[in-house]
Amino acid sequence: MTRQSPKVGVYGFTGCAGDQLMILNCEDQLVDLFGATDIRSFVMAKSDNHEGELDVAFIEGSISTEEQLKRLKEIRERSKVMIAIGTCACHGGPQAMKLGEGKWEEMYKKVYGNAKINVSKAFEAQPIDAFVKVDMYIPGCPIDKTEFLGTVSKLVAGRHPYLLKAPVCLECRWRENPCILYAGRFCAGPLTKSGCGAVCPTHNLPCVGCWGPTDDLNVSSEYELLKEKGYDPDEIIKKIKKFGGARVAQLVKDLEKKKEAKT
Ligand code: SF4
Ligand code: SF4
């Protein structure tokens, strides 16, 4: 290990741990990854963990308890760069699909009944940037190996990582797939961030938006395309907020407002 190797921490909060598993699933590159970086803390991968100053903290999962919030803030304070990995950390994930509707306690009771949870006070699950500054987002449910390794390589080389900002449709077109929307099935590709290689439409399955909302500037016309195909705004919101959480619902509402203001 060289002294220049970036000190890295990988942490998980509310989520399925699939993104951490995906990192471990980089089998062929794992030795290189551990060789090029100084992994200080990664509970799922090793037992000898040290908490201290970090160059990069990768954070998986949404924040849903007071204890998690305290821990997140503590990690932020000692990290130069914080990167959200996976849809839960980036957008809140499925647990945040009803964010802001005040129904989380109802859902909580469906799972835990009236059992008193003493571990930590829970609250509506939110993406990590609701609480701390986030320097970069690697979305996905789970994240894509190539995007993760590409980001780490650039960080190790002292370069600024960059992810494609276009929607899934772009990667889908690159693969020359017949468009599922034109076959009359709802596909969330136009409003979903790319990075997965359009894996679902390539297997004739509609995209359900697991990469979360795209930050492409052309989102307005993509949304209009969905409406032209006969889908109403409520239906679009309902379908894509499963992974996009409140943020995507707001995105669609803002587009509607802009349109109303023009008419
Ligand atoms: S709408 Fe779906 S199937 Fe059509 S181009 Fe976009 S991602 Fe591909
Ligand atoms: S095509 Fe859509 S649902 Fe499938 S992996 Fe990509 S973003 Fe997720």
Image (cartoon, helix red, strand yellow):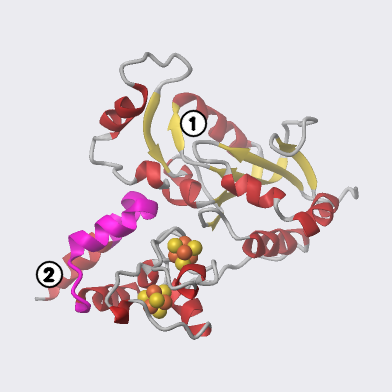
Residue tagged 1: 69
Q: Residue at x 33, y 59 (%)?
A: 240
Q: Which mark is residue 82?
A: none
Q: Residue at x 64, y 51 (%)?
A: 22
Q: Residues within 10 Å of mark 2 (few under 14, many from 20)?
A: few
Q: Residues within 10 Å of mark 1 (few under 14, many from 20)?
A: some
What secondary structure is marked by label 2?
A: helix
Q: Quadrant of residue 43?
A: top right
What secondary structure is marked by label 1?
A: helix
Distance from disc 1 to disc 2, alpha carbons, whole Å, reads 38 Å
Q: Is residue 235 above or below residue 87?
A: below
Q: Within the displayed image, which quadrant is ligand 1 positioned in?
A: bottom left
Nearest to the observer: residue 169 or residue 251 = 169
Instruction: Answer yes or no: disc 1 within 8 Å of ligand 2.
Output: no
Left-right relation of 73 to 184: right
Left-right relation of 147 to 39: left
For the stretch drawn in magenta, the main secondary structure is helix
Q: Which residues are magenta?
A: 228-251
The x, y position of residue 14, in whole percent, is 49, 36
Q: Judge whether residue 193 can be spotted in this image.
A: no
The x, y position of residue 35, in whole percent, is 86, 52
Instruction: Answer yes or no: disc 2 within 8 Å of ligand 1.
Output: no
Residue tagged 2: 260
Q: Residue at x 62, y 39 (%)?
A: 11
Nearest to the observer: residue 158 or residue 97 = 97
Q: Is residue 140 above or below residue 256?
A: above
**In the rendered structure, which amino acid carries the disc numbered 2?**
Glu
The x, y position of residue 74, in whole percent, is 59, 31
Specify whether residue 246 is painted magenta.
yes
**In the rendered structure, which amino acid carries the disc numbered 1?**
Leu
